[in-house]
Image (cartoon, rainbow, N blue to C red):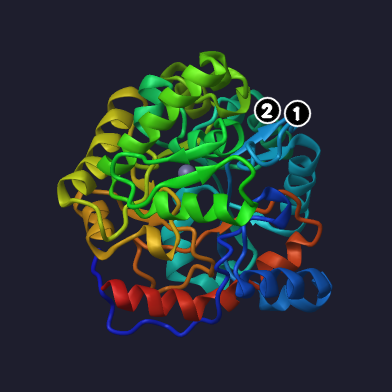
Amino acid sequence: MLWPPLCIPQCIAPDRASGRGKESGKRLSLQGRLFREVSAALPAALTRPLGAPAAVFFHGVEHVISNPLLQENHHALDAFYAIARALKRDFEIAPLSELPDVLRSPKKHRRTVFLMSDDGYANTLSTAAGVLESFGLPWALFISTQHIDSGELNPMFIARLFSQYAPAGEYAFPGFPTPVRFGGTERTERHSFRERLRSLPAERARAVISEMRRILENSRGAELMDRYASERFLGWDEVRALAQRGVTIGAHADWHWPMHGGEDPKFLKLQTELPKRRIEAEVGTCRYFAYPFGNEKDVSGPAWRAVRDAGYDYAFTTMSGTLCTQLNPWLLPRYGLALEEPNLTSRISLLRFGNRRLSHWQRRLH
Ligand SMILES: [Zn+2]
């Protein structure tokens, strides 16, 4: 597969949101909020002709969300059911095997949507799979193999847990540039802490996360780590069970951490080669990759080249946009489904307004 193409299409404006609703506890940019408000206000009949093929993703699905700030990656079952019904009613949900044809002829596939789930939470098997099967919707699951191998919690979940449960005080974490105060902090400060954490190279971030975990276990008890069943990962037997039910299994790196410009090339190589090897040993062919976090600051030029060199055919970001012919196949757009999507048809139909930002970004990373 050749990259770059001779020219990059100007497909249109951005959703920095990378697709999470305000109710999820994640903060949206002005552009993301604008996109959401406009798409919520326009009737589907008006927006449908603007539709183009797209990819959308979710994380997990829980029967009941008991702590929305901590469980921000999970849809409530009734909201997820409504999303699946809307997808079935208004779109053609296709398996990833149809991706080459869709990229070749997007105009022939205006209503085509690829549905995916990231991380590999156990509730994708216990809850999401049944809903999607009941509607006959194909989907792909992108797993972070270290977490499947070890059951280790998502590092950002530990950071969220720390934000809520750490004893009040000032903490000087190893490798973190400045001390951080917790306890009574405003939501914006907690958000800013997690943003700064996310920009650290993996090795430094690991040290911070491990210190957080130690402090939480000492102060709140080890059982806090297991209190939220939503955060449990699948094991390999369960991943195989999903594959046998027709779910395409892709890689979501090894350790769930951004592949940004501050990362060591050796880390990028490991993050791309290791999950492919593990999935192929445990399940079968692995042709697809999805970047952890996957937004503008989370994916670098060396990262997508590492994905390409590891032998993946396609990779997905969390930049919004539609699937166009001349996109870099290792930097494809994907919209993250908000926790509630009352106007999903308009929202997906308007994703093309992210294409301009997407193409600028791809040029910068080239
Ligand atoms: Zn993820």
Nearest to viewer (mark 1 / mark 2): 1
| Mark 2 neighbour density, 10 Å: few (under 14) some (14–19) many (20 or more) | some
Are the residues at dot 1 and dot 2 in contact (C-beta closer than 8 Å)?
yes
Q: In percent of the image, x 39 and y 42: which residue is there?
A: 252
Mark 1 is on which residue type? Answer: His
Q: Position of residue 352 (x, y in %)?
A: 58, 75
Q: Is mark 2 within 8 Å of ligand 1?
A: no
Q: Is residue 29 left or right of residue 238?
A: right
Residue 214 figure quarter: top left
Q: What label does residue 209 carry, if any?
A: none
Q: Judge whether 220 appears above or below 267 on screen.
A: above
**Camera-nearest residue between 249 and 210:** 210
**Front-lying residue, 167 or 136:** 167
SS for tag 2?
helix
Q: Give the secondary structure at mark 1.
A: loop
Quarter holding the C terminus?
bottom left
Residue 20 appears in the figure: yes
Q: x, y (%) of residue 202?
A: 29, 44
Q: Which residue is mark 2?
A: 127
Q: Three-letter amino acid code at disc 2?
A: Thr
The mark nearer the N terminus, 1 or 2, is 1
The count of marks equals 2
Q: Residue at x 71, y 57 (%)?
A: 22
Q: Which residue is mark 1?
A: 63
Residue found 56% across the figure and 42% down from its top: 139
Quarter in which the N terminus is drawn: bottom left
Q: Nearer the viewer, residue 25 or 89?
A: 25
